[in-house]
Image (cartoon, helix red, strand yellow):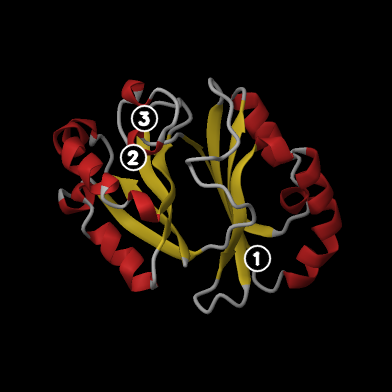
Amino acid sequence: MLYSIKVFDKPDSGPERDVARQAHLDYLKSFDSRTWFGGPMLADDGETAVGSHRLMDFDTVEDAKAHLRDEPYVIAGIQRGMEVLPWSNSVPWTWHDCPRTEGFIQFLIIAYDKQGSDDLRNELRAAHEAYQAQVSDLYVTRGPLMNDARDCQIGSLMIIDVPDDAAGRAFWNDEPFNQGGLFERSEVYRWRFGRVFDQFKPELQAGAG
């Protein structure tokens, strides 16, 4: 089963990251077969790491949480405040084969539904699906966040691949679910593929996230 796994960096932890990075990279490599996507969440400057996000396949939510608890960055106190939510993929790609353009930048968008918003979602669905078809070439991955029982959608998660910051912001501003007020809150991060999961020049990346 797929899970969205998010954790935040302690502020100003760059030097500590450097010390623990190799252990972190080795740990991620050991989970290659379970990782659909993985990389650091970045500040608006596109450089400063503010956390990490992974989409991974585990048998149970406890397995997903245990994976994060054993992460070298977490053990070292560099990362904290985990969020693990069931996720369902709407496209079949992983980091190995996802649509992507070399030189583009990525955004991670996590949006949480308002309580009792099923009717509103249904009202907006046709416009949402038409928009998805219009921008389908921008998606690296996308799919719904689910409740623990996996019988109810509680939000949306997507990674997009765009030429620049303005294109990423415009994508989300024009999304009908977002425009229509479906979400209680949304988080938009610059994101990039971590060193272990980057098919383009991974040796140039500063860290894996």
Name the spot of residue 33 as percent of width and height, x first: 37, 53
Name the residue: 64% across, 63% down: 113
Residue placed most toward the observer, 3 or 73? 3
Tell me whether the residue at label 2 lies in contact with that at label 1, contact meaning CB atoms closer than 8 angstroms: no
| Tag 3: amino acid | Thr
Instruction: Choose top left, top right, bottom left or bottom right for residue 114.
Output: bottom right
Helix, strand or loop at disc 3? Answer: loop
Labelled disc at residue 45: none
Mark closer to the observer (1, 3): 3
Q: Position of residue 6 (x, y in %)?
A: 40, 53
The amino acid type found where label 1 is placed reads Lys
Kind of residue at disc 2: Gly
Q: Nearer the viewer, residue 94 or 155?
A: 94
Q: Is residue 162 above or below residue 141?
A: above
SS of the residue under disc 2: loop
On the image, numbered disc 3 is attached to which residue? Answer: 48
9 above or below 15?
below
Which image quadrant is residue 201 in?
Answer: top left
**Residue named by callout 1:** 114
Q: CA distance from mark 3 to mark 2?
A: 11 Å
Q: CA distance from mark 1 to mark 3?
A: 30 Å
> Can you give x and y, in whole percent of width and height, for residue 138 in the image?
66, 36
In the picture of the structure, the residue carrying the numbered disc 2 is 209
Q: Residue at (25%, 34%) from the top-left corner?
A: 12
176 or 207: which is nearer to us?
Answer: 207
